[in-house]
Amino acid sequence: MRILVIDDDRPSRELAARLVDNLGHSPVTADDGAQGLALARSERPDLLLLDLYMPAMSGLEVVREIRADPSLRAVPVIAVSSGTTEDQQAALSAGCNEFLSKPYELAALRAAIDRHSSAET
């Protein structure tokens, strides 16, 4: 499965990509929302791991664009953020399928990916 990791924090992005790789999936990374959206449109990932707080284009804006694009709207999006309960509700309302709080454990990431792997596009 091809998983796009969008996170402006380099250590978080690299850790997520390594974890995705260790789980046997193919990671693709983007360091901001705009780049992530462009990669989603060109690479057609099977799943997105999306940080909520990024400059220029937030994760909420990215997921809204994903959900508005007929060719991407079925791609599962897992929000990953150290945000509050309100952030979690906003992410789910914007169209994210799930929310993982940072820092998350490998087992939690594996379980989230497994839950959405049957929804591959």
Image (tube, rainbow, N blue to C red):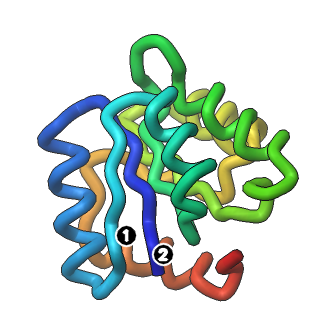
Is 15 placed above or below 83 here?
below
What residue sits 54% from the left and 32% below the top?
59
Q: Read off the residue under disc 1.
A: 109
For badge 1, the amino acid type reads Leu
Q: Residue at x 38, y 52 (%)?
A: 5
Residue 73 placement: quadrant:
bottom right
Q: Residue lying furthest top in this view?
A: 56
Give me the disc on residue 113: 2
Q: Quadrant of the C terminus?
A: bottom right
Residue 3, image x, y percentages: 44, 66
Residue 108, how many percent across, how many down? 37, 71
Residue 121 to residue 8: above or below: below
In the picture as drawn, the residue positioned furthest to the front comes out as 42
Q: Is residue 84 above or below residue 36?
A: above
Q: Nearer the viewer, residue 48 or 102?
A: 48
Residue 64 vertical position relative to residue 112 in the rendered view, above or below: above
Q: Residues within 10 Å of mark 1 (few under 14, many from 20)?
A: some
Q: Give the percent coordinates (x, y) of residue 61.
A: 65, 26
Question: Is 9 left or right of 110, judged from the image as shown?
Answer: left
Q: Secondary structure at mark 2?
A: helix
The residue located at (61%, 33%) in the rendering is 62
Q: Are marks 2 and 1 in contact (CB under 8 Å)?
A: yes
Mark identifier at residue 48: none
Q: In the orientation shown, which residue stands out farthest toward the left? A: 11
